[in-house]
Image: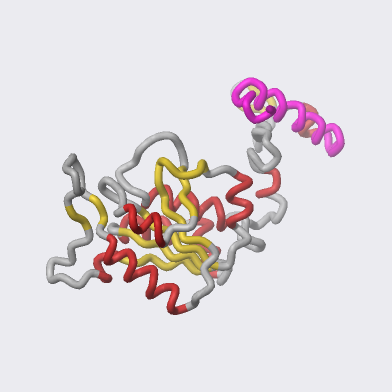
Amino acid sequence: MRIDILTALPGLVEGPLQHSILQRAGRKGLVDVRVHDLRSYTQDKHRQIDDYPYGGGAGMVLKPEPIFACIEALQAEAPVVDEVIFLSPDGDRLTQPLANTLSMAGRLILLAGHYKGVDQRVRDTLVTREISIGDYVLSGGELPALVLVDALVRLLPGVLGDATSALSDSFQDQLLDAPHYTRPASFRGMDVPDVLRSGDHEKIEAWRQAHRLEKTQTRRPDLLK
């Protein structure tokens, strides 16, 4: 999988890509994440990427020229792009099923908005999908882009040490995850449930399933509907 991230703040994006699962996936050649500075696609001497909104109002809007130039250059390299995704609070909610679907793509372009967003002509012409990570507003789309990248990359075959780990995550089957324990078996008077130490995998699975249902019913009953 190749993922291109367009941003006004490349330094904010590049750091997390050098750590943990994202770094290991890149070193294994399982994903190729490239970060593009929108200022590199400007034509004026001030490298201006934003301007005041027509009609007035607070904030600045990302200009269309550098975004069009960047995306068109990337498409010229390899015309087949599965999705051009704009990270926006008014996009479709990122869910595990959506992450599962996007993880099967060969190439994605992610546009991280900033300031008051991007010129609407970008959204109307270039963007094929808009995604939100929640009902709140951040300073820009860089962190949501990283959230999306992490959600996708961990699903790629060979990224996680245990291939079945991602399949048992919360939301994979509309249930939250069960409690997890590790050594020591007893800590400050709190003991690991006997069933988890029994070695009986059938009982362990039944225990986990019961706790997943209970937690989902308590915390996210909407998922059970």
Q: Main secondary structure of the magenta part?
A: helix
- Front in this rendered view, residue 157 or 88: 88
Q: In the displayed structure, does residue 14 sit left or right of residue 186?
A: left
- Front residue (pair 30, 121): 121
Q: How is the image coloured?
A: secondary structure
Give the side of residue 77 with respect to residue 104, left or right.
Answer: left
- Residue that protrudes farthest toward the left in the picture: 45
Give the percent coordinates (x, y) of residue 219.
60, 23
User: Which residue, as the protein is rendered here, is positioned at the far bottom?
Assistant: 77
- Residue at 78% x, 27% y: name it: 194
Residue toward you, 156 or 135 = 135
Residue 40: image location, x then y, percent? 26, 70
Residue 120 is situated, as x and y percent measured from the top left of the image, at: 33, 52
Is 133 in the magenta?
no
Which image quadrant for residue 95?
top right
Quadrant placement of the N terminus? bottom right
Q: Is residue 207 above or below residue 117?
A: above
* 212 in relation to 125, above or below: above
Residue 75 sits in which quadrant? bottom left
Residue in the picture at 26% in, 48% down: 115
Q: Is residue 175 left or right of residue 40?
A: right
Quarter of the rendering containing residue 102: bottom right
**Residue 223, image x and y in percent?**
65, 30
Whether residue 75 is visible to the viewer of this picture, yes or no, is yes
**Which residue occupies 64% across, 22% down?**
190
Position of residue 170 in the picture relative to residue 145 (left or right):
right
Magenta-colored span: 198-225
Residue at point 29% right, 50% down? 114
